[in-house]
């Protein structure tokens, strides 16, 4: 909810390496039963360790999930910080057969997020 987000505002750094490692482990040890697998990465800032996650991405991609990226921004207009977040997150998502990643990526403002009670 908005109160949580206000109290837990953006930190100066965002790290994903450990989270990718944990996700890869979960998928690697989960049974494969024919269902599609999806991983959602949601960030409100640039990923400070995005250049050091190749090993984790290789492990993650071995389980063949669709990887989606969502940048949540605070304002309607993109800021420099939002564009940095997009630039570091978008290369981590999966794409179509030609490598186009636009179908698995979105950059949205907080007002367009939804809760179980409807739009915020």
Image (cartoon, rainbow, N blue to C red):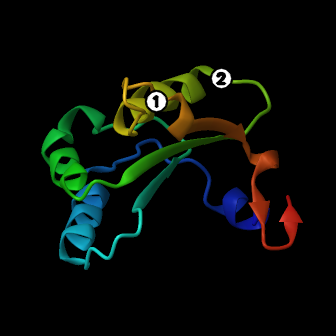
Vertical order, 65 against 47 (above or below): below
Q: Quadrant of residue 107?
A: top right
Quadrant where the N terminus sits is bottom right
Q: Nearer the viewer, residue 46 or 32?
A: 32
**Residue topped by disc 2:** 79
Q: Which mark is residue 117?
A: none
Q: Quadrant of residue 99?
A: top left
- Is 47 on the left or on the right of 81, as rendered? left
Quadrant where the C terminus sits is bottom right
Provide residue 72's location: percent of width, then percent of height: 63, 43
Dot in front, 2 or 1: 1
Q: Nearer the viewer, residue 79 or 26?
A: 26
Secondary structure under badge 1? loop
Going 12% across and 45% down the picture, which residue do you hit?
Answer: 55
Provide residue 90's location: percent of width, then percent of height: 44, 31
Q: Using a 10 Å C-alpha cutoff, classify the residue at mark 1 as few (fewer than 14 neighbours), some (14 to 19) or many (20 or more).
A: some
Provide residue 111's location: percent of width, then percent of height: 82, 47
Numbered disc total: 2
Provide residue 47's location: percent of width, then percent of height: 39, 38
Going 37% across and 30% down the picture, which residue do you hit?
Answer: 97
Going 55% across and 35% down the picture, which residue do you hit?
Answer: 103
Q: Residue furthest front?
A: 34
Secondary structure under badge 2? loop
**Residue topped by disc 1:** 101
């Amino acid at each position: 909810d908005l109160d949580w987000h206000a109290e837990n505002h953006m930190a100066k750094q965002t790290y994903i390496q450990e989270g990718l490692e944990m996700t890869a482990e979960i998928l690697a040890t989960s049974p494969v039963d024919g269902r599609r697998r999806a991983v959602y990465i949601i960030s409100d800032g640039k990923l400070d360790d995005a250049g050091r996650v190749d090993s984790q991405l290789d492990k993650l991609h071995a389980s063949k999930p669709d990887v989606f990226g969502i940048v949540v921004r605070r304002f309607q207009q993109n800021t420099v910080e939002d564009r940095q977040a997009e630039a570091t997150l978008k290369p981590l998502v999966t794409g179509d057969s030609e490598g186009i990643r636009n179908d698995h990526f979105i950059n949205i403002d907080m007002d367009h997020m939804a809760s179980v009670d409807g739009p915020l």
